[in-house]
């Protein structure tokens, strides 16, 4: 699994970059940021797909009325 970065690490490194741009290592961590965003998008996409699957199943499930 690719390296990922936490929100607190991102905020800390962004602040350090802002305070001292010449000594920053933020650019070396950009791949970690990209990997984290990609992983989050993948999870989000899966959740949306699951929601749509359930909605389609409801649409195509026969509805029977209880009449006797």
Image (cartoon, helix red, strand yellow):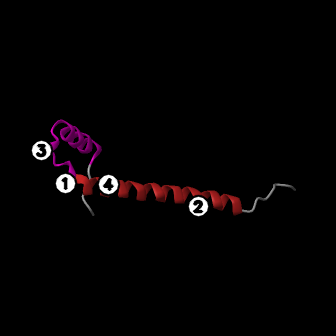
**Does residue 14 belong to the magenta stretch?**
yes
Q: Which is more N-terminal, label 4 or label 2?
A: 4
Residue 41's mark? Answer: none
Give the vertical position of 16 relative to 2 (above or below).
Answer: above
Q: Position of residue 45 (x, y in %)?
A: 47, 58
Q: On residue 36, which mark appears?
A: 4
Image quadrant of residue 14? top left
**Residue at horizontal 15%, vertical 45%?**
24
Q: Is residue 31 left or right of residue 64?
A: left
Q: Which residue is drawn at 35% across and 54% down?
A: 37
**Is residue 17 depicted above or below 57 in this figure?**
above
Mark 3 against mark 1, which lies toward the viewer? 3
The answer to whether 52 appears left or right of 16 in the picture is: right
How many neighbours does mark 3 have within 10 angstroms: few (below 14), some (14-19), or many (20 or more)? few
Residues marked 3 and 1 touching at CB (< 8 Å):
no
64 relative to 6, above or below: below
Residue at image mark 1: 28
Mark 4 near mark 3, Cβ–Cβ under 8 Å?
Answer: no
- How far is the residue under mark 2 from the one under mark 3? 49 Å
Say which of 7 and 16 sits in front: 16
The mark closer to the camera, 4 or 3, is 3
| Segment colored magenta | 6-28
The furthest residue to the top: 19
Measure the C-alpha gap from mark 4 to mark 1: 14 Å
Q: Distance between the residues labelled 4 and 3?
A: 24 Å
Check disc 2 and report its element: helix, strand or loop: helix
Neighbours of disc 4 within 10 Å: few (<14), some (14-19), many (20+): some
Mark 2 — residue? 53
Marks 2 & 4, CB-CB < 8 Å contact: no
Please tell me the numbered disc located at residue 23: 3
Q: Quadrant of the C terminus?
A: bottom right
């Amino acid at each position: 699994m690719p390296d990922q970065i936490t929100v607190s690490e991102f905020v800390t490194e962004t602040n350090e970059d802002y305070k001292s741009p010449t000594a920053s290592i933020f650019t070396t961590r950009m791949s970690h940021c990209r990997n984290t965003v990609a992983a989050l998008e993948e999870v989000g996409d899966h959740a949306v797909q699951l929601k749509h699957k359930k909605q389609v199943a409801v649409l195509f499930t026969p509805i029977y009325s209880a009449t006797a």
